[in-house]
Amino acid sequence: MGIDVRAHVHTVRKRWPILVLAVAASVGGTFAWTYRQPRIFEASCSVIIDSMAPQYLQGIKDVVEMGTGSYWGNREFHETQYRIMTSKDIALRAVDKLGLVNDIDYPVPNTGQVKNRTPEMLAGMVAGQTKIVPVKESRIANIVVRDRLPQRAALIANAMADAYIEKNLEYKMEESRTAQDWFLDLRSMVVTSPGPQEGKTTTAISLAISTAMGGTRVILVDTDLRRPRVHRSVGLPNVTGVSNLIVGETTLEAVRHTEVPNLDVLTCGPTPPNPAEWLHTERFKNLIRDLTARYDRVIFDSPPTSLVTDPAVIANLTDGVMLVVRGGVTTRDAAAYARRQLGDAKAHILGAIINHVDLSDKGYYYHYVRYYRGYSKYGRYYADASDGGKA
């Protein structure tokens, strides 16, 4: 059965005034309803998400920034920051900054209602009218606020941004104070690595310089009695040093000043035939006590842990040991083995430093070299140490 088009057209022509009136009534009703709705204004404030971790020591920064690495890690970090921006804690700070508890025009103008309002209740309202609009492929996020008053929308957006920045600064300051208090409690520490050529000497020198530049009296001691390197790095002769002090051939006059204020260096001296035995002597223990009494911080550069026990021996006489690993070279197994060695020797492991990290290498986090390479290189490490005791 077909549709009778002519009948429908005839009906529309006959009743078109009613149809026009219905459409007009619908449009008019919609317009009236929209007109009576309160006007809502929108304001935004842009903030840059800081992905830098707290810097605890002058000149030393974290190798890997917060929010870097894999795509998912980066996304999770930024999503967390967006949640913080719209959190009730940040909104509560904004409420306090703007004095909204005593604002008779918030949230609805001209109501004059200020009774039975708490900061927490208003913070919930502020958080509810705030959203975050990230700018693609950037660290910029827009804090967008909708409100009945345009000026107040802008004030709330700015107050939320200020509160978020202040919260971040407070967190970083607290973390920095905690780390500095922890670091300042250390009078002596050993710097070592699982294997050779992983940057332990460079790290020890950097720690010594950074600490000295902060006003602390520091001495860097080269206790790598097999392959000393500190004297070369700082440009000092290696005529007398630790080995001479252990056998009683010299005094602490062997200590050398450097061009860095507050930083002195005690080189290794001539390499002995049996370094491990020398480190167990009472004179070496007395040397550590004398240096700790004279300086605020004593940093020892020691050999790698792979095949010698020297780092564990020294660590037992100091406040702890810092393990240095090299990105893309040190294997998980090598680092774990070094940790076990130090742990078995009852050494206090302070932490680990990862250096030489190539953040542009997308596959870095999944790349590990073969474990045996560490030991094969270790043999070459001492094989080419023919000039160990020479200047």
Image (cartoon, rainbow, N blue to C red):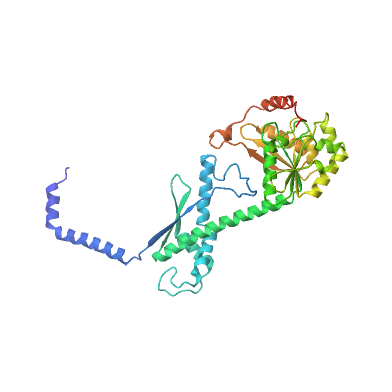
The front one of 100 and 219 is: 219
Residue 130 occupies quadrant: bottom left
Q: Is residue 209 above or below residue 334?
A: below
Evaluate whether residue 355 shows in this view: yes
Q: Which quarter shows the N terminus? A: top left
Looking at the rendered structure, the number of numbered marks drawn on it comes to: 0
Question: In the picture provided, is 306 more to the left or to the right than 118?
Answer: right
Evaluate whether residue 345 shows in this view: no
Question: In the picture provided, is 75 more to the left or to the right than 328?
Answer: left
Image coordinates of residue 48 in percent, x first then y, are 49, 51
- Name the residue located 46 percent from the left edge and 46 percent from the top edge: 138
The front one of 221 and 96 is: 221
Image coordinates of residue 232 in percent, x first then y, are 70, 34
Q: Is residue 35 above or below residue 265?
A: below
The front one of 174 and 303 is: 303
Question: In the picture provided, is 134 more to the left or to the right than 89?
Answer: left
Residue 377 occupies quadrant: top right
- Name the residue located 51 percent from the left edge and 49 percent from the top edge: 79
Image coordinates of residue 35 in percent, x first then y, are 30, 65
Image coordinates of residue 314 in percent, x first then y, are 79, 39
Q: Is residue 312 above or below residue 148?
A: above
Residue 304 occupies quadrant: top right
Question: In the picture provided, is 290 more to the left or to the right than 127?
Answer: right
- Name the residue located 17 percent from the left edge and 59 percent from the top edge: 20
Q: Which quarter shows the C terminus? A: top right
